Image (spheres, rainbow, N blue to C red):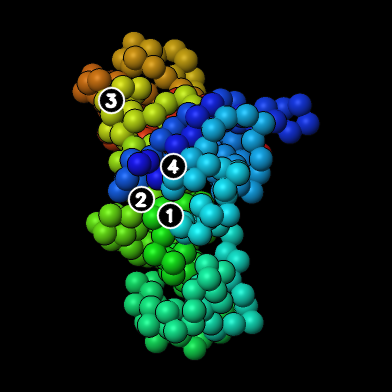
Amino acid sequence: MSPLRVSALRKSYDGREVVAGLDFELQRGECYGLLGPNGAGKTTTLRCCLGLTTPDSGQITLVGEPVPARAREARMKIGVVPQFDNLDPDFTAAENLIVYGRYFGMKDAAIRPKIGELLEFAGLSGKADANIRTLSGGMKRRLTLARALVNDPELLLLDEPTTGLDPQARHLIWERLKRLQAQGKTILLTTHFMDEAERLCQRLAIIDAGRMVAEGAPRELIRGHIEAQVVEVYGEDAPAWAAQEAQAFSRRVEVSGETAFCYVEDAAPLLAHLAARPSLRTLHRPANLEDVFLKLTGRELRD
């Protein structure tokens, strides 16, 4: 049984369709990414999956339960890490875990033996009695992840779990998520960090304007949608150079500000050409998931 199946999901607000016929299905034990620019419909999709927003049409099955008809029963079997921490600032770290466990009908006697293990998982050993106000942002985020595990969920829904964290905290959360996957947990992840999606997700969907524009394994998407190599060309002269000369060496060129992105299969001719242009700075790298994302959703700023 799939932990989450979404079929022909649609939702509109004030006559604007924000989710426009989405279909996707998670496989047990995988990390599935949901990527998209701001306003793409990710949060509305998650809210529909949790039964917090009623869709206009479509079918959702969450851990074997139809949603929204049995959303409450489904939520008892999952864990959620929201986009913004909602820990109770008046409680200690341990008390937050206990109170959250009670929401699932768990007795304190069943929760207390788990506290040490959950805090160790979050890298918070010794912080059981710490007030939430004394914890750093990274500590709070890790505690929120640990809290989502208190009921031993079948599925974890993580909404941008590392936004606002420093690199050390992000890497620690990545390591913990990989540990959960090794234990067989299924994860649905939304993120704006493409390196995070590449590291963690076995499969992912890119959505824009409420529609799926691509789905697959990260490396498959890169191979299928983008050239193998990218040469970034910087400098005040880069836009003019791109307009006049870049097409002779590149399959595709995109200009953003003072940077020209040249997409090529073989970078050697372009790099040889640029070596004679000392006013232009270059960065040569393999294509990555961010290149795919920007190609499919555009470079314009979203609010």
Vertical placement of residue 186 versus 268, above or below: below
Q: Are marks 2 and 4 in contact (CB under 8 Å)?
A: yes
Q: Which numbered disc, 1 or 4, marks the residue that appears first in the sequence? A: 4
In whole angstroms, how far apart are the C-alphas of marks 2 and 4?
10 Å
Q: Nearer the viewer, mark 1 or mark 4?
A: 4
**Secondary element at tag 3:** helix
Could you say which disc has been placed on residue 227 in the image?
A: none
Left or right, 40 with reference to 121: right
Q: Which numbered disc, 3 or 2, marks the residue that appears first in the sequence? A: 2
Residue 155, percent from left and from top: 41, 53
- Which amino acid type is shown beneath numbered disc 1? Leu
In whole angstroms, how far apart are the C-alphas of marks 1 and 2?
6 Å
Q: Which residue is mark 3?
A: 223
- Which amino acid type is shown beneath numbered disc 2? Thr
Q: Which residue is mark 2?
A: 186
Q: Which numbered disc, 3 or 4, marks the residue that appears first in the sequence? A: 4
In whole angstroms, how far apart are the C-alphas of marks 1 and 3?
29 Å
